[in-house]
Image: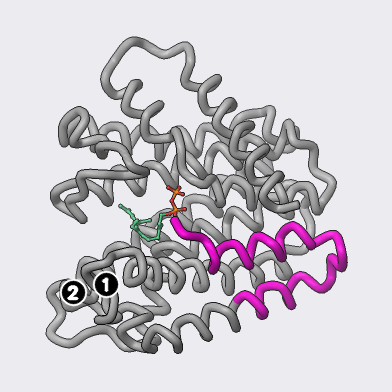
Amino acid sequence: MFSDALRRDAARIGAHLDEVLAKEPDLPVIHGMRYAVSGGKRLRGFLVMEGARLHGVPEAQAIWPAAAIEAIHAYSLVHDDLPCMDDDDLRRGLPTVHRKWDDGTAVLVGDALQTLGFELVLDAACHADPVVRADLALSLARASGHRGMVLGQALDIQAETAETPLTLDQITELQAGKTGALIVWSAQAGARLAQSDLKPLTDYATALGLAFQIADDILDVEGDETTVGKAVGKDADRGKATFVSLLGLDGAKRRASDLVDAACDALSPYGARAQTLNEAAQFVISRDT
Ligand code: GRG
């Protein structure tokens, strides 16, 4: 069952990250790294673990890319929260890293978590074959860098000063990078470890990543009482296009639901073994955080 698997994997990934960061010097940057990787739903790490189970990859190997993607995801959140980006005071219900320490420490925490992600997939315990480890590292670089997440974030920043709001195609491209690329990499990692066909999990996660972002825009509207009834949300309040501002609340919900159906269809080659990933797709659009 998905919720049990998510809970178990989240605990295992947290323990692995704790272990990796245990024997480090007593410095603010290290405390900040531990702080930034704690908590969260661990959805990306779970996708790695479940994709690996689907391909018969041992957990002792899958835990390395699972911890790696959570480190990279945490870096992106720490940097996104900085005053020069989204300027947020709270993350996961706690003060953001730059609020708890300072901006300089938060920049370094993000930098160090990013490089830690690559160190983890390149660890010999991740896979005996260095070619497989290099494939994981190269694809992770592409997913997180200027062809993936950083590209999405750059397009997002550019959209803030654009004269006209983005179109549906433009926001879909932006979000495919900003949130989709890491989700796709996470789902592919098990198949990469098994040197197996990437297509079913790529198609699954491409639809899932978009559904995740649409759900995020819906949560932004429905979770914020000041915007309820206005059907906009924080980003649309700043003049930025969102899936809700472009499709309407009901249209966005329908689109998210269609994408979840498409994600589940993509897993048909795995038959009943894909049940937990199907449940994960449903969770992504029904979550409340
Ligand atoms: C700074 C290069 C750089 C990129 C930042 C991911 C990102 C790009 C920004 C985050 C902004 C944001 C709130 C996006 C909405 C979708 C999203 C990534 C939400 C956070 O992910 P969850 O819900 O978080 O999986 P947890 O806390 O559960 O890990």
Residue 132, x across and y down, in percent? 69, 44
Residue 268, x across and y down, in percent? 81, 73
> In this rendering, is residue 221 above or below 88?
below
What residue is rendered at 74% in x and 37% in y? 129
* Residue 116 located within the stretch drawn in magenta: no
Residue 54, x across and y down, in percent? 80, 53
What residue is rendered at 50% in x and 72% in y? 210
| Residue 233 marker | 1
Query: Which element carries disc 2, helix, strand or loop?
Result: helix
> In this rendering, is residue 114 above or below 2?
above
What residue is rendered at 54% in x and 68% in y? 285
| Residue 99 marker | none
Q: Tag 1: residue type?
A: Gly
Question: In this rendering, would 284 be left or right of 27?
Answer: right
> In this rendering, is residue 275 above or below 23?
below
Question: In this rendering, would 158 be left or right of 50?
Answer: left
The span picked out in magenta is 260-289
